[in-house]
Image (spheres, rainbow, N blue to C red):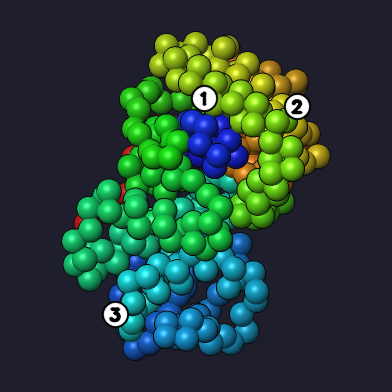
Amino acid sequence: MILFGEHAVVSGAPALGAAVDMRVRVRVEDASGLVIEARNLDLVLDGLTIDLLSRKAGMKEITGKALHATRYVSAVLAEVEARNLHVVVESEIPPSSGLGSSASVVVATLAALNDHRGLGLSSAEIAEKAYSIEKNVQKGMGSRMDTALATFGGYQVVTDKAEAVDLPKLDLIVGCTGKPHDTGLEVEKVQRLRARYPDVVDPVFEAMGAISRRALTHLRERELTELGLLMNVNHGLLESIGVGTRELTELVYAARGAGRALGAKLTGAGGGGCMIALPGLEEHDQSRAMTAIVQAGGEAFPVTTGCEGVWLG
């Protein structure tokens, strides 16, 4: 999950992200042929056979949405020239929501293949390969953030590289709009805007980078009121570059208003997906924020940041 600095990180400004307590589990077994089975991804998928030489898929009663959802698994299998395997993917993370689902699937699939086939990849090698695969699927649009978090866990500051930082855990509320987004398309849209108005967009990215740097101190010192204010400013900057939506904004303002959150912002690429809220400091503020988000039309659930990354072996 990106806490601060979405989109700015693609252009080199620092962003701060955190691994959360939601898991993707991948199981790999020997089989005749190559079959992907996706579960808990808002789709029904009986099976998908892939010819890795032609990169074409043989489908029976399979929707375009199902193929889209498994494209990251397919890319991993193609990368390692996998054959005769049954791959089962189970995810707790809503797809196309801005919570790092695709990166988590890539990392988990690589780790499972690493274990099953004895590839001998280290965590650092898995993170690097996962980043390359995800970026290729997203047509060159992306950062190291989500794959680094899925691999190493904890917190990461990302610019052109990922660097782990030691910060305390944080309890947040996630609000999902139920509207999927496409990370690649949103990033491409913002980059087009930047190419057209660099003198306008670059200062916005610089401001986001400054927010990410200040957030490190406030989170480390548990200065949550200040952290909430920075979340609000970051959301406004993301709105200014066109990645906010009516649904996201309604959840953000509901959390800040009736929910009494210290701060709230969209997370991820925008254009749909999810927002995050930092609950207030009183006893019932977490449930109050969740109720406000639900009443505004979203789905709400709590997460804890700074959690463990991929499990190897």
Give the mark nearer the N terminus: 3 vs 1: 3
Question: Does residue 172 lie above or below 96 as drawn?
Answer: above
Q: How far across and down, in percent of the image, does residue 220 sit?
A: 41, 16
Give the mark nearer the N terminus: 2 vs 1: 1
- Residue at 54% x, 21% y: name it: 210
Check disc 2 and report the residue beneath it: 253
Point out the frontmost of discs 3 and 1.
1
Compare residues 287 and 307 and report the one nearer the observer.
307
Q: How far across and down, in percent of the image, does residue 157 sit?
A: 42, 32
Distance from Cα at disc 3 to Cα at disc 1: 45 Å
Question: How many marks overall?
Answer: 3
**10 Å crowding of disc 1: few (<14), some (14-19), many (20+):** many
Q: Are marks 2 and 1 in contact (CB under 8 Å)?
A: no
Callout 2 secondary element: helix
Question: Does residue 46 lie above or below 19 as drawn?
Answer: below
Q: Mark 1: which amino acid?
A: Ser
- Residue at 22% x, 71% y: name it: 117
Distance from Cα at disc 2 to Cα at disc 3: 50 Å
Q: Which mark is residue 212?
A: 1
